[in-house]
Amino acid sequence: MLDLSAAQPDVLVLVGTQTGNSEVVADAIAERLGDLGFAVHLLDMAEAWPEALAEHPQAIAVTCTWSDGTFPDNAVDFAEALDAVRPDLSGVRFGVCGLGDRDYDPYYQTAAVRLVDLFRECGATEAAPLHDIDGGPTPSDVAGAVGWAVECARAFADA
Ligand SMILES: Cc1cc2nc3c(=O)[nH]c(=O)nc-3n(C[C@H](O)[C@H](O)[C@H](O)COP(=O)(O)O)c2cc1C
């Protein structure tokens, strides 16, 4: 069992999705982190704002890439606002899980990669490298993402 004694209980789980796959992955991650004892705040990126990130020192974002390398519709405004506002996220640890499809090369995962860059440029620290899902997501992809999120949680607890 993960020792959460050193961890902050709060985790923000942000979801960027066009057709719901990222939501399936985010829901599974949220459920597992909840089972581990975290207080999980699941937030559609359409409802998110840049300053909210600074209020949650631990964040996991799950987003697909859509339409030749862009963010899904519900995440476009959030990504643009993050780029414009650039809040100080130096106290934030984060992980990004990207859904995409290599058939869309050269735009494979470009939104997820951009989101990692934006978090970093605002001073946040990656808890684990970008976790990418190519196609699917199959049950095994979802399980892999949940395992990756637990690694993020371990990094949250160890910090
Ligand atoms: C019209 C369309 C455009 C897509 N564009 C990209 C893309 O540019 N890059 C990429 O990596 N994946 C792309 N994909 C794959 C999606 O990211 C993938 O299907 C993902 O699972 C969708 O997640 P969502 O259900 O959360 O929206 C595209 C899929 C469709 C149907």
Image: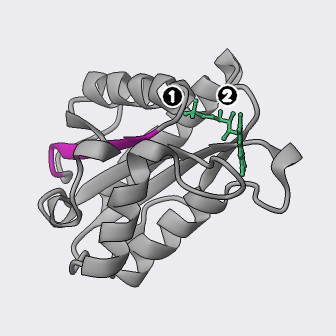
Can you say whether 13 is above or below 26 in the image?
below
Tell me where the magenta segment starts and ends, as one range: 8-16
Residue drawn at x 51%, y 31% as measured from the top left:
146
Q: Would you say the residues marked 1 and 2 are in contact, meaning their CB atoms lie under 8 Å apart?
A: yes
Give the number of callouts. Answer: 2
Q: Please give the label number shown on residue 25.
A: 1
Amino acid on which the number 1 mark rests in the picture: Val
Q: Please give the label number shown on residue 141.
A: 2
* Camera sees residue 13: no
Based on the displayed image, in which of its 4 quarters is residue 113 positioned?
bottom right
Is disc 1's CB within 8 Å of ligand 1?
Answer: yes
Q: Secondary structure at mark 2?
A: helix
**Which quadrant does ligand 1 occupy?**
top right
* Camera sees residue 59: yes
The alpha-carbon separation of the residues under discs 1 and 2 comes to 8 Å
Residue drawn at x 39%, y 24% as measured from the top left:
27
